Structure formats: C-alpha cells, structure tokens
Image: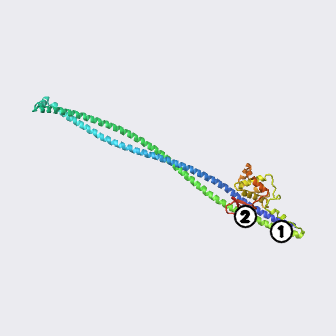
Amino acid sequence: MIQKKNILCIIMLLCICMVWNSQARAGAIQDKIDSTGRKISELERELEASDQNISSYQEEQRVLEQDISSEQEKISSLSAQLDDTRASIKSTKEEITKTQKELIKSKEDSAEQYEQMKQRIRFMYENSMEDMLTYVLEAGSLPEALRRANYFQTVMNYDREKLHEYKATTRKIKQAKLKLISDKKELEELEEEQTQNIAQIDAAVQELKGRLSAKIAQIQSSQQLRQKYEQELQQQRQYEKELERQKAEEDLKREEEIRRQKEELERRRKEQEEKRKEQEQQQRSASDNDSSAGVWYDSRSASLGASDLELLSTLIYCEAGNQPYEGKLAVGSVVMNRVASSSFPNSISGVIYQSGQFSPVASGRFASALASGLGSQCSSVAQEVLNGKRNVTCLYFRVDTGMIDGLVIGDHVFY
C-alpha cells in the first residue's frame, strides 16, 4: 500500500515537473514578447519623431524655395533694368559721338565763314573807299547805284549774321555735348549700382541654395532613417507574431499536458479506489478525490486576503480596462480558474505574479496602476468574480490575432 502511494507521488511529481518546465518555456517566450513589445513601442516613437522632423524640414524647404524664387525675380527685374541702363549708355555714347561730329562740323563751318568774311572785309578795306564809291557812282542810274550800295551792306550784314549764327550753333552743340557727358556719367553710376545690387542678391541666392541643398540632404537622411525604422518595425512585428504563435503553441501544449496529466491521475485514482474498495469494502465518493483537479475556485485551493480584490481589479483594469463587461469578467474568471487549478499557484497573488504570465506585470504597468489605485474602476467586476461569478472555464487568453481557436470576447480570445 505504501509502495503504491510512493509510485503515485512520484508520478505526480514528474507531472508537476513537466508542467513547470512547460511554464518556464512559456515564461521565457513571454519575456521575449514583452521585450519585443517595448522595442516596437520605442520604434513607433522614433517613427513618429521622424515623421515630425521630415514634415518640419519639408516646410523649411518650401520656405527656402519661395525665398529663392523671390530673390531670382528681383535679379530678373534688376537685370532688365540693367539692360535698359546699358542700352541708354550705348545710345548716349552714340549721341555724344554724333554731337562731337556736329560740333566739329560747326566749328569747321564757322571757321570757313570767318575766313570768307575776312577775305571780303580785306578786299573792301584793301581797295579804297574811293574805289567802292566810284563803283557806286559809275552806276548808270540811281536805282543801280542804290542796288550796288545795298549789295555791299548786305554782304557785310550776311557775314556778320552767319558768324553769330555759327557761334550760337557751336555753343548749343557744346552744351548738348556736356549734357550728354553728364547723362552718361549718371548712367554709368546707375549701371555700377545695379550691377552691385545684382551681385549682392545673387550671393544671397547662392547662400539660400546652399541651405536648400543641406535641407534636402537632411530630408533624404531623415527619410532613409525613417525607412530603416519602418523596416525594423516590420521585422519586430513579424517577430512578435512569431513569438505569439510560439507562445500559443506552448500554452496549448501545456494545456494538453495538464489535461493528459489529469486524465492519468484520474485513471490511477480510480484504480486505487477500486483496489481500496476491494480491500476495505468502503464506499467513497469520486467527487472528494477529484476536488483538486477542478477548475472552479473554492476555499481549499485559495485563501482570499484583504488585498485580493485590489490585485484582481487592477489586473482586470490593465488587461481589459477598455473591454466590455463580459471581457472584464472573462479575465477575472481566468485568474480564478488558475487559482483553482493544481497546475498554477493556489492564490490570486501567486497567479498574478507568476513569471511570464501577464504582460502588464512584466512591463511594470500593473505596479504603477496598483500604486495609483486605477483598479478601482473594475472593482465591481472583480467582486462579482470573487463571489463566484464566471463566464469562461479557460486558463489562458491573449489578444485575438486569428491564429488561436477559442472563445472570442471583445479584443481577446480565451482558450
């Protein structure tokens, strides 16, 4: 009898060890899932920061392009003005050349007229006045004499007027030349000023283009970095999915192992029961022997302390705070199902703090919510669970990705 009990204990210990090994593997995978989740969150933050930087850089690029366009329009306008100024300078130079020629021609005409007048005066004065008088008096008639006298007077008046006229023309041409030279100087000064302005604006444009090139390079670098983050984020998400799949497989294996162990224990208990019946002729209830294998909570499997309500309500808040009532109740039911199971710790705190089982506990969010009293938002549901209300008989749940068969409630699948 003692030997059979020892064999049964050994079998139970082996089963427990196998379950613990399975739990350890699941815990290791859960640690990887938690670590990957943190990496994903960090990459998402980096990706968001990259998007903000790129948006800011692109706005700066747009402003620089507008500034360059505006400065280039100024250059275009000043270039047109410079072309007009240079055309005016060219025209003025041509006018100066033309005026110079006219001045030379006027001086030559004036000199020639002056020489002709000197010759005529010399002729009149070199010949005596008597000869001129004789010339007048020898006229055959008075009208002819008057005509000859008027001729001498007309010639003298003509020479005098022409000389005055040529002098006036020469003065006018000189004044026009001086005016053109002054205009040319002003135009050349304007040309120099416009050239300097264009050079200054062009230098500003080159500086803006340099800044624009640097900004474009910065945008390209940020886009490359963003692409790197995006690729790494996709890899981490794929890795997370693979870990979730592995975790689900481990959970299913562990659940199957637990089920198989329970069946094996039940079979051996039945065998022992039959033998005891034969040997002792005593009738025992099978329900008394199966009490430790149930999945419902009772006073022998867990002792509820004063902090159990707070622990349970906080876990429900962290895992299903955004879920409907049935989803919150299901999470609480899973915790109590584990408390009642021989494959898990027999207390609420033991189940919640078991390594690798609940992501909020591993990440520290559970501790923060517990310290802040956020679990009070789910205390009514937790109290119903502690009072014995259940809506699932499952031992596991996770975010529904479509890869695990089970009861879907809200965003979770229970299995």
The amino acid sitting under disc 1 is Lys
x 65%, y 54%: residue: 41
Say whether residue 66 is left or right of residue 364.
left
Q: Which mark is residue 64?
A: none
x 47%, y 45%: residue: 203
Query: Would you name the residue on which mark 1 appears?
Result: 270
Q: Dot 1 surroundings within 10 Å: few (below 14), some, or many (20 or more)?
A: some
Describe the element under mark 2 as helix, strand or loop.
helix
Residue 215 showing in the rendered view: yes
Describe the element under mark 1 as helix, strand or loop.
helix
In this view, the residue farthest toward the right is 280
Image coordinates for residue 40, horizontal then vertical, percent: 65, 55
x 34%, y 37%: residue: 179
Query: Would you name the residue on which mark 2 appears?
Result: 252
In front: 300, or 76? Answer: 300
Instruction: Give residue 129's quadrant in the image.
Output: top left
